[in-house]
Amino acid sequence: MSRQLGCLVMAGALMMASAPAYSGDAEAGLALARSWCAQCHVVEASQDRASDVAPPFAQIANDPTKSARGIAVWLADPHPPMPNLNLTQQEIDDLVAYIATLKTD
């Protein structure tokens, strides 16, 4: 293996190792979304209504400016008008995992 290729492989491995892992449970995330988020957000296709203020989860999932990390950071420290739900890291990971299932791109 050439020295340059070896450096690229090593850099890629280091980047992957330092990336946060979102190993949430999407089913648990859906359950959380139904109980805590559905009053304001459309959290699944079968939901009839929600607030006009909060974007649907599918829209969040398919917004190219929103990453899993960004969503997790937002959930950890939300800004008004979203209430601070004081979610645990596992709950955040579960919600991020569920939202990821709605991505169509």
Image (cartoon, helix red, strand yellow):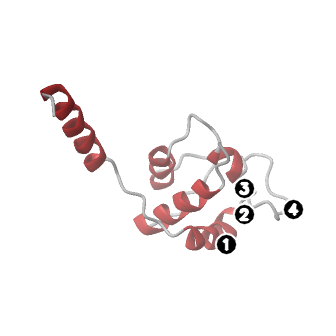
Secondary structure, mark 4, is loop
Secondary structure, mark 2, is loop
State how far apart marks 4 and 3 are (Cα).
Answer: 11 Å
| Quadrant location, the C terminus | top right
Q: Nearer the viewer, residue 54 or 66?
A: 66
Q: Nearer the viewer, residue 95 or 76?
A: 95
Marks 2/3 in contact by CB < 8 Å: the verdict is yes
Q: Residues within 10 Å of mark 4 (few under 14, many from 20)?
A: few
State how far apart marks 4 and 2 are (Cα).
Answer: 10 Å
* Residue corresponding to mark 2: 38
Amino acid at circle 2: Ala
Q: Residues within 10 Å of mark 2 (few under 14, many from 20)?
A: many
> Closer to the N terminus: mark 1 or mark 4?
1
Marks 2/1 in contact by CB < 8 Å: the verdict is yes
Amino acid at circle 1: Ser
Residue 86 can be seen, yes or no: no
Question: Residue 88's x, y, as percent?
Answer: 43, 67
Image label count: 4
Q: Residue furthest left?
A: 3
Amino acid at circle 3: His
* Residue corresponding to mark 3: 41
Residue 16 can be seen, yes or no: yes
State how far apart marks 1 and 4 are (Cα).
Answer: 15 Å
State how far apart marks 2 and 1 are (Cα).
Answer: 7 Å
> Closer to the N terminus: mark 3 or mark 1?
1
Secondary structure, mark 1, is helix
Amino acid at circle 4: Asp
Marks 3/1 in contact by CB < 8 Å: the verdict is no
Quadrant hosting residue 5: top left
Left or right: 43 as drawn, with respect to 5? right
Q: Residues within 10 Å of mark 3 (few under 14, many from 20)?
A: many
